[in-house]
Amino acid sequence: MPTLFTKIINREIPAKILFETDSVLAFQDIHPQAPHHVLIVPKREIPTINDLDRETAPLIGELFLAAKELAARFGVAESGYRVVMNCNQDGGQTVFHLHLHFLAGRALTWPPG
Ligand code: AMP
């Protein structure tokens, strides 16, 4: 069964796509928690951080390079932004296809709830 995000990657479910490479897709979160809330996902299905290994770990770098690109595009590289990756129930993960949340456009409180 393809994940929800694979369906977005395959254009079977609509999303506002903001960035794409051979290995990564970035699209607007459907329930934004900040003026800019983007999900950056590897095209390869990896359920959680716990499933990463030496072969797939370089994809994490690709996710961060996409975040850097988005920050420049939104003009928030200097003012700041947050990237978050949730893992499993206590981490607040609801979609089991690895993804980096990119949040920007307001002052973000710390620690999060
Ligand atoms: P997480 O709770 O870390 O697994 O994050 C999952 C995120 O996916 C949430 O912020 C949701 O708002 C977002 N989401 C769920 N369905 C969609 C969708 N169809 N398009 C875009 N974002 C979605």
Image: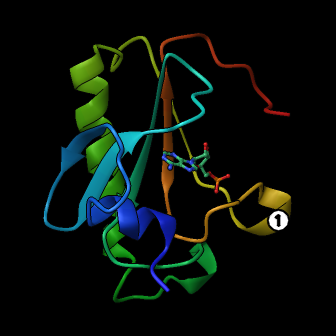
**Residue 89 place in picture, x, y as percent:** 82, 65
Query: In the rendered image of this protein, does residue 27 appear above or below residue 54?
Result: above
Q: State the SS at label 1.
A: helix
**Residue 68 place in picture, x, y as percent:** 29, 37
Q: As drawn, is 12 to the left or to the right of 80?
A: left
**Residue 36 place in picture, x, y as percent:** 45, 23
Query: Amino acid under label 1?
Result: Gln
Residue 26 visible to an observer of this rendering: yes
Instruction: Report the colour scheme.
Output: rainbow
Residue 85, picture quadrant: bottom right
Q: Residue furthest left?
A: 22
Q: As drawn, is 90 to the left or to the right of 98?
A: right
Query: In the rendered image of this protein, does residue 42 appear above or below residue 20?
Result: below
Q: What residue is shown at x 77% (from left), y 54% (from top)?
A: 92
- As rendered, which of 45 and 72 lies closer to the eye? 45
**Residue 8 place in picture, x, y as percent:** 36, 58
Residue 34, picture quadrant: top right
Query: In the rendered image of this protein, does residue 51 appear above or below residue 102?
Result: below
Q: Quadrant of the C terminus?
A: top right
The crowd level at tag 1 (other Cα within 10 Å; few <14, some 14-19, many 20+) is few
Q: As drawn, is 80 to the left or to the right of 89?
A: left
Q: What residue is shown at x 26% (from left), y 59% (from top)?
A: 11
Mark 1 highlights which residue? 89
Q: What residue is shown at x 33% (from left), y 21% (from top)?
A: 77
- As rendered, which of 79 and 84 lies closer to the eye? 84
Label 1 within 8 A of ligand 1 by Cβ: no
Residue 50, picture quadrant: bottom right
